[in-house]
Amino acid sequence: MPTVTFVGVGAIGLPMARRLVDAGHDTTGVDTLPAARERAAAAGVPAVAELAAAPRAEFVIAMVATPDQLAALVSDALGGDVAGQRWVVMSTVGPDAVRAQAARLAGAGAAVIDVPVTGGVARARNGELTLFASGPAADVAAARPVLDALGTVRVVGDEVGAGQAVKVINQHLCAVHIVAAAEALALAGALGLDQAEVLSLVEQGAAGSFMLSDRGRRMLQGTDVEVASAISIFVKDTGLVADAAGAAGARTPLLDAARERFLRAAEAGLAARDDSRVIETYTEAGA
């Protein structure tokens, strides 16, 4: 079984790494946060603080949060020997960032594919993520023993960057759907309705969506609800969507409205809270 170094064992990365362990892959996690490494060890995934401390593996999976973090990871890797390694970029970083870092790695002899994922923490735990895979067909095929343990592979192109482009569309819809769910549940409260009852009534009808059912329940809990995906992630992701739209000359007024809500939530001190807490922007004065 191929060996794996999994960089970024956070909320979604850890259950993904655990799936690889369960599938028989010798997997080492990498995370700069001590708490993340402790959680990984408790889950049966040995973890180290930096890439250089991990045993050399056939596959390196990058599940970091931002384009800058990906660039820093690649810089660290290029301080060693990456020749012959296979890198799988699963972070949401946008087409330009993944192409730039793939070119650096390829120049040093590594094979790179672009495979952002969607589905959330629950589906990561169950191995039911959707993986938007792009890159040379032979490299995607070589990675299938690793990718298949994580979910359903959808090949979206033969060039690195195509997966990120599809993920941009995915995140556009996710951002708008989360904010729409928050606005609707806030409206239910303003109308004097029981928000939980309204959620149970509408989620199975034509108005239902994954984000309404998944985030809606967390919206009805308190600020301290467990973080599955932070507000800061959607600040970053909506920025990537806005940048891609701007470069393409596309108009995205709904995305712009949703982005404003996530930015407002971050400015209110909620950046590290679960993204469902965007509903709190509807309870602010003047919201």
Image (cartoon, rainbow, N blue to C red):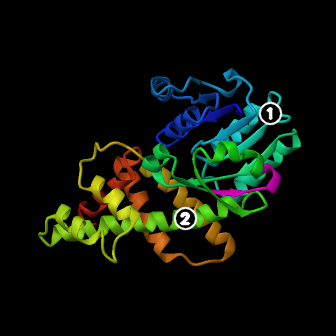
Quadrant assignment for the C terminus: bottom left
Q: Amino acid at mark 2?
A: Asn
Relative placement, left or right, of 183 versus 50 is left
Residue drawn at x 70%, y 33% as measured from the top left: 1
Check disc 2 and report its element: helix, strand or loop. Answer: helix
Where, by quadrant of the figure, is residue 96 drawn? bottom right
The label shown at residue 28 is: none
Q: Is residue 197 visible?
A: yes
- Give the number of marks: 2
Is residue 134 rendered magenta in the image?
yes
Question: As drawn, is 59 to the left or to the right of 17?
Answer: right
State the image coordinates of residue 280 (x, y, percent, origin top left): 28, 57
Please identify, in this view, whether the residue under mark 1 or under mark 2 is nearer the observer: 2
Q: Are marks 1 and 2 in contact (CB under 8 Å)?
A: no
Camera-nearest residue between 23 and 47: 23
* Dot 1 alpha-carbon crowd within 10 angstroms: few under 14, some 14 to 19, many 20 or more: some
> Toward which corner of the image does residue 85 lie, by quadrant?
top right
- Report x, y in % for residue 205: 30, 75
Q: Position of residue 61 (x, y in %)?
A: 66, 40
Q: Which residue is mark 2?
A: 170
Q: Earlier in the sequence, mark 1 or mark 2?
A: 1
Magenta span covers which residues?
A: 132-139
Which residue is denoted by mark 1 in the rendering? 78
Viewer-proximal residue among 39 and 278: 39
As drawn, is 171 to the left or to the right of 197?
right
